[in-house]
């Protein structure tokens, strides 16, 4: 039994007393399970899952709700049943040994009945009553009615015994399931069981376009409301899972937290912060435009934040995706090894649309991811019409939004004309739509990326060239040339021309600078020479001034000497006087 179904808290409903089945999804559809203490008819064609559903009802009741059960098989032996359901994780032998369930095989030989001519259910009541009392059973399954009444040809007696059987089960107070095969033009072969049952569930195994899908519908449920749509259900190693997708309502809360796409330039185009958590984004484009690389980048970024991501791969195997992404610098294998990335790879035509929905729902419930990738959704149109695919994706988006999980879809554009709708018609449903297109120009093909829509955030209106390199994904800034936006080699050529022009301009500037420097040096040398010459002239001029001053001084001294001599002083006295 799966861990997810252990310790499951029972849901309390306030309507008619009901017994929880423990079957994933069925209790939600029936709003609480099967009518408590009353019989329920499960009918359907051979191979629709009647026996498995009824035995899971017994096992879940015994294990999860401590309600022992009796399973009366009119066709299969106990050993056969134990072996058949072992693959679902049900250990019937152990449950029988623990007296939690009791499996009784009742063989009815039609030839013996025809010989004696007498047949009624009295013996069954005694045998069943003993089995119920021996383990205190709260649940009973009779599988199937056709074998039980195979010896009765008299329709009047048969109808009387049928009524008696249903009344007896009600009197015993057990919650019972009676399985029956579908009849011609009616739910059952006898056409009476559905009228005397309080609840009738129809199982259907439909094959459309060579794809089989099991569906469940609650035909009747006395005294309570219930889901009336057809619900797909899945039988796998964890038992039966019914997906009540149409009961989901648009009442989910929204987050304002933003998540990076793993490409900084794309985050800038989305208002600088990336996508809203819990939102949905569609990446569409023609083949080879890098849709899977974008999706893988988002998954890589999610796992790098140590958040779980489930990647539903519809065209490539996980090993292919991991190898291809490694070539552009993304190591997804380490996220797989660390348990953050879970691949679920299958071809779309493996199941019908509803079964894919059930399988995805179950996988998401199991791994509890923060981000889901579905790559691509395009091939779903091979197994259903556009409207069916759209309805399926609406259910998926509603479910993920209810759980607060972000989802990224990729879609292949089947034509090169830009439409306002994708081929799957889901572009109006998603919160953001990123379009990647081929740009054919100058004899080559390049990728261009733009944000077609993005609810609740401002976003760029530019077409950015999208390049896949060995080191990841890059968006090139818009490059305007003389003839408009340039991409690829035209952009590179223009950039080379501009770089060459810049180099020539820089060289010319350098030459001018050097010439200026040279002239500066020459002028500075001339200035230095003139300055030296000026100093020489100045010195010469100053020399004349000094000589004139000296002459004046000498003349003054001589004049004073002459004056003293004329006054009668001797030469010696004159010298003494000058010394004084």
Image (cartoon, rainbow, N blue to C red):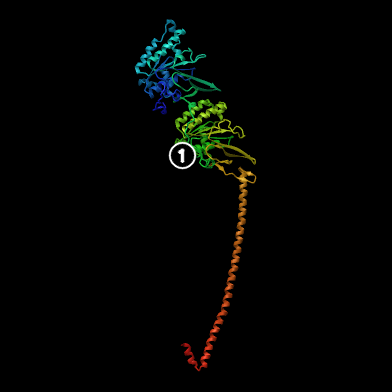
Name the one closer to the observer, 91 or 255. Answer: 255
Q: Secondary structure at mark 1?
A: loop
Residue at the image position 35 percent from the left and 18 percent from the top = 136
Horizontal side of residue 507 vs 301, given as left or right: right
Report x, y in % for residue 101: 38, 19
Residue lying at 57% horizontally and 26% vertically, measured from the top left: 385
* Above or below, comparing residue 411 to residue 158 in the picture: below
In the rendered view, does 210 fall on the left or right side of 133?
Answer: right
Q: Is residue 476 above or below residue 535?
A: above
Q: Nearer the viewer, residue 48 or 328?
A: 48
Residue in the image at 53% along x and 84% along y: 553
Residue that protrudes farthest toward the bottom in the picture: 568
Residue 28 quadrant: top left
Residue 286's spot in the image, x, y percent? 59, 35
| Position above or below: 223 against 322 | above
* Residue 494 in sight from this viewpoint: yes
Q: Is residue 140 visible?
A: no
Q: Which residue is mark 1?
A: 305
Q: Residue furthest top?
A: 116
Label 1 Cα crowd, 10 Å radius (few <14 / some 14-19 / many 20+): few
Dividing the image into 4 quarters, which one contains the N terminus? top left
Q: Nearer the viewer, residue 527 or 190?
A: 190
Q: Position of residue 366 (x, y in %)?
A: 45, 30
């Amino acid at each position: 039994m799966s861990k997810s179904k252990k310790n499951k808290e029972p849901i309390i409903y306030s309507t008619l007393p009901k017994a929880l089945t423990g079957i994933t999804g069925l209790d939600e559809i029936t709003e609480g399970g099967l009518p408590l203490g009353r019989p329920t008819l499960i009918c359907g064609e051979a191979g629709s899952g009647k026996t498995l559903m009824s035995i899971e009802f017994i096992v879940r009741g015994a294990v999860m709700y401590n309600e022992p059960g009796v399973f009366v098989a009119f066709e299969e032996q106990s050993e056969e049943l134990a072996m058949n359901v072992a693959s679902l994780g049900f250990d019937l032998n152990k449950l029988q040994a623990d007296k939690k369930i009791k499996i009784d095989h009742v063989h009815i030989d039609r030839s013996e009945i025809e010989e004696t001519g007498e047949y009624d259910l009295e013996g069954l009541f005694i045998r069943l009553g003993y089995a119920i009392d021996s383990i205190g059973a709260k649940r009973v399954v009779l599988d199937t009615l056709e074998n039980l009444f195979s010896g009765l040809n008299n329709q009047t007696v048969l109808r009387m015994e049928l009524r008696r059987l249903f009344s007896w089960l009600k009197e015993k107070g057990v919650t019972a399931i009676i399985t029956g095969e579908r009849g011609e033009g009616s739910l059952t072969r006898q056409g009476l069981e559905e009228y005397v049952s309080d609840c009738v569930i129809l199982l259907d195994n439909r094959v459309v376009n060579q794809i089989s899908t099991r569906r469940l519908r609650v035909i009747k449920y006395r005294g309570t409301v219930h889901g009336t749509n057809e619900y797909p259900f899945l039988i796998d190693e964890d038992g039966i899972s019914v997906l009540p997708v149409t009961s989901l309502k648009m009442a989910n809360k929204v987050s304002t937290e933003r998540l990076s796409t793993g490409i900084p330039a794309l985050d800038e185009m989305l208002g600088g912060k990336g996508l809203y958590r819990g939102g949905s984004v569609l990446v569409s484009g023609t083949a080879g435009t890098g849709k899977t690389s974008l999706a893988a980048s988002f998954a890589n970024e999610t796992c790098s934040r140590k958040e779980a991501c489930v990647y539903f791969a519809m065209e490539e195997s996980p090993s292919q995706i991991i190898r291809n992404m490694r070539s552009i610098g993304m190591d997804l294998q380490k996220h797989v090894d660390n348990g953050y990335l879970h691949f679920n790879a299958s071809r779309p035509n493996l199941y019908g649309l509803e079964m894919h929905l059930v399988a995805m729902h179950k996988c998401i419930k199991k791994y509890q991811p923060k981000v889901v990738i579905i790559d691509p959704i395009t091939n779903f149109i091979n197994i259903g019409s556009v409207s069916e695919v759209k309805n399926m994706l609406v259910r998926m988006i509603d479910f993920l939004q209810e759980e607060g999980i972000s989802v990224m879809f990729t879609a292949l554009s089947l034509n090169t004309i830009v439409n306002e709708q994708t081929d799957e018609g889901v572009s109006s449903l998603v919160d953001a739509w990123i379009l990647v297109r081929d740009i054919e120009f100058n004899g080559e093909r390049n990728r261009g990326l733009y944000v077609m829509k993005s609810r609740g955030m401002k976003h760029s209106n530019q077409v950015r060239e999208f390049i896949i390199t060995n080191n990841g994904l890059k968006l090139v800034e818009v490059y305007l040339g003389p003839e408009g936006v340039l991409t690829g080699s035209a952009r590179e050529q223009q950039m080379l021309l501009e770089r060459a022009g810049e180099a020539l301009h820089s060289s010319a500037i350098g030459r001018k600078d050097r010439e200026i420097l040279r002239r500066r040096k020459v002028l500075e040398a001339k200035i230095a020479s003139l300055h030296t010459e000026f100093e020489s002239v100045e010195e010469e001029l100053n020399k004349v001034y000094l000589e004139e001053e000296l002459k004046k001084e000498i003349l003054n001294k001589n004049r004073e000497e002459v004056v003293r001599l004329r006054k009668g002083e001797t030469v010696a006295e004159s010298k003494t006087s000058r010394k004084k």
